[in-house]
Structure formats: structure tokens, C-alpha cells
């Protein structure tokens, strides 16, 4: 299917690793121009070069996403380069383990800043450019927003906010024909996930137990599967879809895992 994303300029936060990298690569395969926004120059440049080596186009802007000015500058750098912005994928975040019992208020605030503050900043600063081209926004979220996980109050609260902002922005931006949707992830193998699973003493058994409870195929969701849905939501092929929370998780969140 031709998603008609050729030469569309799409910002991807955290687009240099894990799910974000998967999204950047799929967008490039669809002939779009992913603009990878991250803070580690080596990782960002590596992903850009990998995309270009495969014949795709990519651009980048370095930014510490907890810094409002750096978020604004990344967007302005993109506009100066291309003269347009057609989409935004808010993806960057970290399950930082700030819990109720093992955390503190300062840590909780920091977690919100790291996991949802920049979702607002990026959308706010990109909005004038998205209006001009009736662009789309896709927020990446986590099942923790609806299932909980334990010992991760900051991350769970941030993902609940991501879901709410998706609905709020979809409503607020109706007059500009800007669609806003969210892709909710459960179990996907990323560098961050590998670190988490390896933190258990019985990591192999833990991993086998998790995949056994994923209803569709008893396997992890791939970053490409997540990215394919993101690309669809950014495209005109989903032209009447907005305000939706779409779970790309093999049924893990909502189907009976005892099956």
C-alpha cells in the first residue's frame, strides 16, 4: 500500500533507538523524511547514516527534551531546512521505576518531565507548522496507563496523561484538520526492555512467562509492527481516524491471557 508519505517531513523524538528507530526506518521506507530528535549525537548520526545507506532520506536535530528551548530550537531547525513539517511522533521516554513506596516527590516530578512534559512542548512548538499542512500527531504510549505495573508511579501517570492529551488535542485541533492518535505498546523488545528483563535473577524464566501470556502468537511485538501502525496513522489512508488509542500488543492488554 502506498501511504503517500513521500517527502513528508515528520519529527520523531527518540528516533534513534528502540521503537523510535523502528518508526524512523519505516517512515524512510515509505519515502518520508524522518527528523530524528535525540540527545546522543553518535546514536542519532548512526541511525541517519543507516537510513541513507539504504537509499532513504533522514535529518536530525539534537535536543535534551526536558529543555523547552532545545525542543523549540529542534523544530525551528527542521523548518529552516525543509520549510514544512507534516507530522510529529512523540515517542521518547523511560520507565524509570519511580514508585510510591520507593520514590519521592522530586523523583515523581522529574519522571513526569522526562515522560510527558516534552510531548506537550513538541506539540506546542510544532503546531504553527502542522496547521499549514494539516499534519498529524501520533503519541506513543504504554499499557501501564491502563494496567499499572507496580513501582512506577511516574511512568504510569505520564502514560495516562499521554492518553488524555491524545483525546484533548484531537478535540482542540479539529478546526485545523489535525488528527491526533496514540499507539499503545505492551511487550516489545527494545534495548530498554532488555535491560529491564535482565534485572531479574530469573530473567530467562521471566521472559518465557511473559511471552507465553501474549495471546496472538505467544511472541513479542516487533518495533516494525508498531512502526507500520504509526505510519498508517500519519498518512492520508487514516484520514477519518482521530482521538483513538490503538493497542499494538498482540492482545496482551485486553484479551484473556489465561488462554
Image (tube, grey):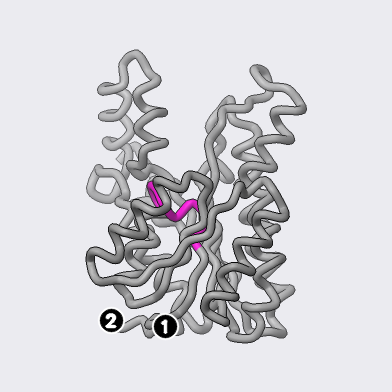
- Considering the numbered disc 1 on the image, is that residue within a helix, a strand or a loop? helix
For residue 1, the mark is 2
Tell me the quadrant of the picture where the C terminus can be found.
top left
Q: Residues within 10 Å of mark 1 (few under 14, many from 20)?
A: some
- Quadrant location of residue 163? bottom right
Query: Quadrant of residue 196 in the image?
Result: top left
Q: Decide whether residue 140 is among the magenta residues.
A: no
Mark sitting on residue 255: none
Residue reaching furthest right? Answer: 105
The residue shown at (64%, 69%) is 76
Question: In the figure, is residue 133 to the left or right of 101?
Answer: left
Residue identifier under label 1: 237
At horizontal 38% and vertical 44% (from top left) the residue drawn is 256
Where is residue 102? Give x, y as percent. 64, 17
Residue 157's quadrant in the figure?
top right
Q: Give the Cα separation between the discs numbered 2 and 1.
A: 9 Å
Which corner quadrant holds the N terminus? bottom left
Looking at the image, residue 208 sits to the left or right of residue 6; the answer is left
SS at badge 2? loop
Neighbor class of circle 2 (other Cα within 10 Å; few <14, some 14-19, many 20+) is few
The residue lying at 53 percent from left, 35 percent from top is: 95
Q: Which residues are magenta?
A: 12-19
Please provide percent x and percent y for residue 41.
46, 48
Image vertical order of residue 90 relative to residue 187, above or below: below
Task: Judge whether 190 appears above or below 229 on screen.
Answer: above
**Earlier sequence position, callout 2 versus callout 1:** 2
Residue 245 point in image, percent of width and height: 54, 61
Image coordinates of residue 63 in percent, x first then y, are 58, 52
The answer to the question of whether label 2 and label 1 lie on touching residues, with beta carbons closer than 8 A, is yes
Amino acid at each position: 500500500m502506498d501511504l503517500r508519505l513521500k517527502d513528508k517531513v515528520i519529527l520523531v523524538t527518540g528516533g534513534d533507538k528502540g521503537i523510535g528507530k523502528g518508526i524512523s526506518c519505516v517512515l524512510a521506507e515509505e519515502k518520508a523524511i524522518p527528523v530524528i530528535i535525540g540527545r546522543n549525537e553518535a546514536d542519532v548520526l548512526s541511525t541517519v547514516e543507516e537510513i541513507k545507506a539504504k537509499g532513504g532520506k533522514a535529518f536530525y536535530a539534537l535536543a535534551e527534551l526536558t529543555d523547552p528551548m532545545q525542543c523549540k530550537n529542534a523544530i525551528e531547525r527542521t523548518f529552516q531546512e525543509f520549510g514544512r513539517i507534516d507530522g510529529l511522533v512523540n515517542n521518547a521516554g523511560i520507565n524509570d521505576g519511580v514508585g510510591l513506596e520507593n520514590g519521592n516527590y522530586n523523583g515523581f516530578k522529574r519522571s513526569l518531565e522526562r515522560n510527558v512534559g516534552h510531548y506537550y512542548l513538541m506539540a506546542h512548538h510544532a503546531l504553527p507548522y502542522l496547521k499549514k499542512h494539516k499534519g498529524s500527531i501520533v503519541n506513543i504510549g504504554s499499557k501501564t496507563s491502563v494496567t499499572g505495573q507496580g513501582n512506577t508511579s511516574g511512568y504510569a501517570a505520564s502514560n495516562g496523561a499521554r492518553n488524555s492529551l491524545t483525546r484533548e488535542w484531537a478535540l482542540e485541533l479539529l478546526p485545523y484538520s489535525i488528527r491526533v492518535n496514540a499507539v499503545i505498546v505492551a511487550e516489545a523488545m527494545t534495548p530498554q526492555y532488555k535491560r529491564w528483563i535482565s534485572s531479574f535473577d530469573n530473567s530467562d524464566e521471566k521472559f518465557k512467562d511473559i511471552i507465553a501470556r501474549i495471546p496472538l502468537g505467544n511472541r513479542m511485538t516487533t518495533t516494525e509492527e508498531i512502526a507500520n501502525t504509526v505510519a498508517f496513522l500519519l498518512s492520508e489512508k487514516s484520514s477519518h481516524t482521530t482521538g483513538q488509542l490503538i493497542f499494538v500488543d498482540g492482545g496482551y492488554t485486553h484479551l484473556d491471557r489465561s488462554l
